[in-house]
Amino acid sequence: MQNHVTIAPSIMCADLCNLEKSIKEIESAGLDTLHIDVIDGSFSPSMPLGLSTIEQLRKITNMNFDVHIMSNDNEFFIQEMLKIGVEQITFHLETTKHVDRYINMIRKHDTKVGIALNPATPLSALDYVLPQCDTVLLMLINPGFASDKGEAQVPYATKKVEDLYNLIQSKGLDTSIEVDGRVSLETIPKLVNAGADMLVAGSTSLYAKGQSLAENKKTVENLIEEGLNEEVKLNG
């Protein structure tokens, strides 16, 4: 059972016109990890941040950069992120021909490796590479369509997290489970209960309207606690 859950604010949900101010607000709330989507406009239709912007962000904060590459050309963006200096690089299995090559490329720089799976990609795709992953990121909506406010999480979201948790346990690994896509105030307890230990927090949680970021963080922490306590009850 996980005992620590990381809240990773999604920078694309912050005030993109005032990024430095947004970063300082996140830091002031006591959060140490920043989720950064790198999107090529082809794999997914949006493109929130350019490489030079991420480079500038690196200069103003010591937060852990959790980079999620959504691209049809993973190698280019992996190399760019390694140059900038980030703590974790996650790339999609669906667009990668040479998975082991990219894992090794990232590991050589003492950077954590994450593999991302689209909602319908089966966990069996991880069969041979799971032991080499620090993190598996499960997309719970189709990647890059967060602006479609009507899109709900896939109905099998919680089951997929639970199945991955059981797979990791069965192999005796300590791989993290990161969840991304409508990780909302309603879904957080269930996702944590199922085994998620890293939450990409965006417009339906940390940036939910009506409360400050600090207030939303407290709410999210309470919901995480609820999910962990539920798990204790279930396993006890």
Image: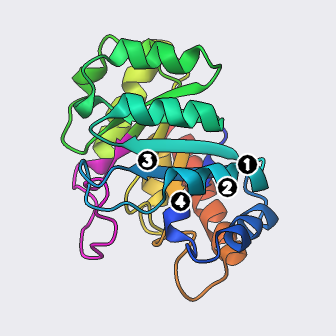
| Residue assigned mark 2 | 57
Is residue 136 in sight in this rendering? no
Determine the residue positioned at 61% across, 32% down.
83
Question: Looking at the rendered structure, which numbered label has been put on residue 179?
Answer: 3
Which residue of the protein is positioned furthest toward the bottom in this rendering? 210
Residue 16: percent from left, percent from top: 55, 72
Q: In which quarter of the image is residue 212?
A: bottom right
- Whether the residues at callouts 3 and 4 have beta carbons within 8 Å, the answer is no
Secondary-structure class at tag 4 = loop
Secondary-structure class at tag 2 = helix
Decide which of tag 3 and tag 4 comes sooner along the chain: 4
Front label number (3 vs 2): 2
| Residue assigned mark 1 | 63
Is residue 13 in sight in this rendering? yes
Mark 1 is surrounded, within 10 Å at the Cα level, by few (under 14), some (14 to 19) or many (20 or more) other residues, namely: some
Decide which of tag 2 and tag 4 comes sooner along the chain: 4
